[in-house]
Image (cartoon, grey):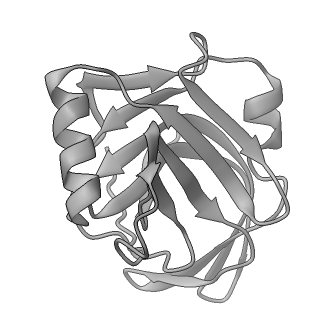
Amino acid sequence: MTTLERRAAAQLTVNNRRLVGYAARFNTETQIADFREVIRPGAFHQSLASGRDILCLRDHDAAVLLGRTKSNTLELREDDQGLYFSLAVPDTQAGRDLLALAERGDLGGMSFGFRAIDEAWQGDLRELRQVELHEVSIVQAFPAYEATTVEARARTVPNMNRAWLETVRC
């Protein structure tokens, strides 16, 4: 069994109780511990095409469910920039807290949990060609893919936070 990995990155915008942005950007190299990593276009295609239920969580915590693809409260798609997401934020305490933090610019960013299916190494550069996507998370910590964005929409909030990245092995 391969290790479930997590990546975090962000910037946020709120619009009509929706968080939108990019949970991952393609062809953007970042430093992770003692190696560099880049996500290639199409890396999420098979996961998204499979129709599997992908969750949106807060800080990778399954006890704080914010949305899911099965109920259409979470939209995920690949475009030429990366993995785009749109989350209908729930009217729960966690959702209200999340919107308040987004509007203040206090959120750390986005993250995603995955297993690498197809990867290639060239020296210390890891290239992710295909991943099995399990979840995306709104994080309140330190992401590092600086090109990634998260935007909370209800009114336009300029550049809430820069992207970050964390690797957590479970």
What's the residue at 28%, 20% (across, down)?
91
What's the residue at 26%, 70% (across, down)?
142
- Direction from residue 165 to residue 146 in the image, left or right: right
Residue 72 in percent (x, y) is at 61, 17
When the figure is inspected, residue 98 is found, relative to residue 74, above or below; the finding is: below
Between residues 50 and 3, which one lies in front from this camera angle? 50
- Direction from residue 10 to residue 86 in the image, left or right: right
Q: Looking at the rendering, which quadrant does residue 103 occupy? A: bottom left
Count of all numbered marks drawn on residues in the image: 0
Q: Looking at the rendering, which quadrant does residue 117 occupy? A: top right
When the figure is inspected, residue 121 is found, relative to residue 4, above or below; the finding is: below
Residue 5 in percent (x, y) is at 45, 50
Between residues 99 and 68, which one lies in front from this camera angle? 99
Residue 34 in percent (x, y) is at 41, 85
What's the residue at 76%, 66% (across, down)?
81
What's the residue at 59%, 58% (across, down)?
22
* Residue farthest along the top direction in this orientation: 71
- Direction from residue 97 to residue 130 in the image, left or right: right
Q: Is residue 6 visible?
A: no
When the figure is inspected, residue 94 is found, relative to residue 105, above or below; the finding is: above
Q: Looking at the rendering, which quadrant does residue 8 occupy? A: bottom left
